[in-house]
Amino acid sequence: MATQAGKFQCASCGAGMEWDPAAARLVCPACKSGLEVHPLGSLDEIPFAEFAGQQRRLSETALEVRCGGCGAVTQFEPGQVAGKCPFCAAAIVMQPKAADPLIAPHGVLPFAVTSDRAAGAVKAWLGGLWFAPNDLKAVAQQEGLQGVYIPYWTYDAETYSEYSGRRGKWFVDQRGQRQLAWTECSGSVVCAFDDVLAPASKAVQPARLDALEPWRLDAVKPYEAAYLAGFKAQRYQVELKDGFSHAASKMRVAIEGMAVRDIGGDQQQVTGVRTRYAGLTFKHVLLPVWIGAYRYRGQVFQVVANAQSGTVSGERPVSAAKVALAVLLALILLCAWLYLRD
């Protein structure tokens, strides 16, 4: 695979090739020649204590630019232009510079949903929003969607948790009434977690990204820059240690659920949990999204689509006129019902 100025050069015509989600390979936009991608690396878990020394650039030719509006840093290969920020729709006016070293991505989930399919999914999502302003669709289409790889941390761990709680059991008292008797209890549970995801972006709300799950993490490939050809990649904004806090909150829900099952009885309450983590490992992976950031009457709204499944999550403005109309119709129907009842 020949490269030139950060591009993956077509052997037939010399143009820069780009990753094609539909074909699942590099495709030359000029002559339509295709090229399979065969990553050479391996996708290994990294012990949490050994993350130092993992820093390097996405590629030797990668550039990065910081948005002056929201502060997000995106990285891309020469040949692409910074254009508008994918996250806030602000025009990028700062000059790109050579990408800084970072904890290198270990894996990448290639784009599988085309821009046309993503646009259709977003259009359907917008169409189901009755309270959205009528001109929202035109605004969103005008701004368009950008393909961006969002940084994530994944964590593996074994957890050993001691819990305290209460076990409730129903009984019938002397008057024949059902009562719930509570008994204090404690115990321990062991869990094993694999690839617990934590978004490493602050440019998109974590809840918005969580709504895009599940991801097919079994399809993640060892990192190869060819998968990024034609797309941008956001530099992580959440450090490895901070990302673990988000992952630990997900683990905590599962641990408490296991504690509830361990308590037994008719009803359960978990009042405290102490957890010890062992065998903690991580990976830095890039997951693909189509994102549209649009400005509507002075406010910025985001719509993101999982570029593997097509799942859409987003923000939308509400039409005050439509809300007022709905309230008026509800009042009219209520008055009519009261009139007919009398």
Image (spheres, rainbow, N blue to C red):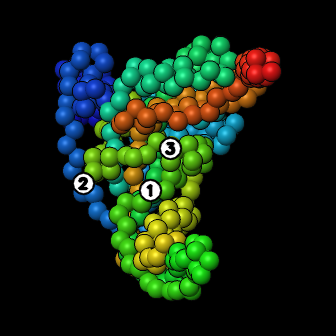
The residue carrying mark 2 is 41
Q: Residue at x 76, y 22 (%)?
A: 341
Q: Quadrant of the C terminus?
A: top right
On the picture, is 129 further left or further right than 248? Answer: right
Which residue is the extreme one toward the front?
175
From the viewer's perspective, is the residue at label 1 or at label 2 nearer?
A: 1
Q: Residue at x 48, y 72 (%)?
A: 266
Residue 48 lies in quadrant: bottom left
The residue carrying mark 1 is 197
Distance from Cα at disc 1 to Cα at disc 2:
22 Å
Disc number placed over residue 246 in the picture, else none: none
Q: Could you tell me the amino acid type at mark 3? A: Ala
Q: Could you tell me the amino acid type at mark 2? A: Gly
The location of residue 242, given as percent across then percent down, is 57, 64
Q: Find numbered disc 2 in the image and state the secondary structure of the residue it sits on.
A: loop
Dot 3 alpha-carbon crowd within 10 angstroms: few under 14, some 14 to 19, many 20 or more: some
Along the viewing direction, whichever of 182 and 234 lies nearer the viewer: 182
From the viewer's perspective, is the residue at label 3 or at label 1 nearer?
A: 3
The location of residue 290, given as percent across then percent down, is 46, 31
Disc number placed over residue 211 in the picture, else none: 3
Q: Residue at x 42, y 72 (%)?
A: 261
Dot 2 alpha-carbon crowd within 10 angstroms: few under 14, some 14 to 19, many 20 or more: few
On the picture, is 73 further left or further right than 90? Answer: left
Q: Find numbered disc 3 in the image and state the secondary structure of the residue it sits on.
A: loop
The answer to which of marks 3 and 1 sits earlier in the sequence is 1
On the picture, is 316 further left or further right than 32? Answer: right
Along the viewing direction, whichever of 323 and 303 lies nearer the viewer: 323
The location of residue 329, given as percent across then percent down, is 74, 17
Distance from Cα at disc 3 to Cα at disc 1:
12 Å
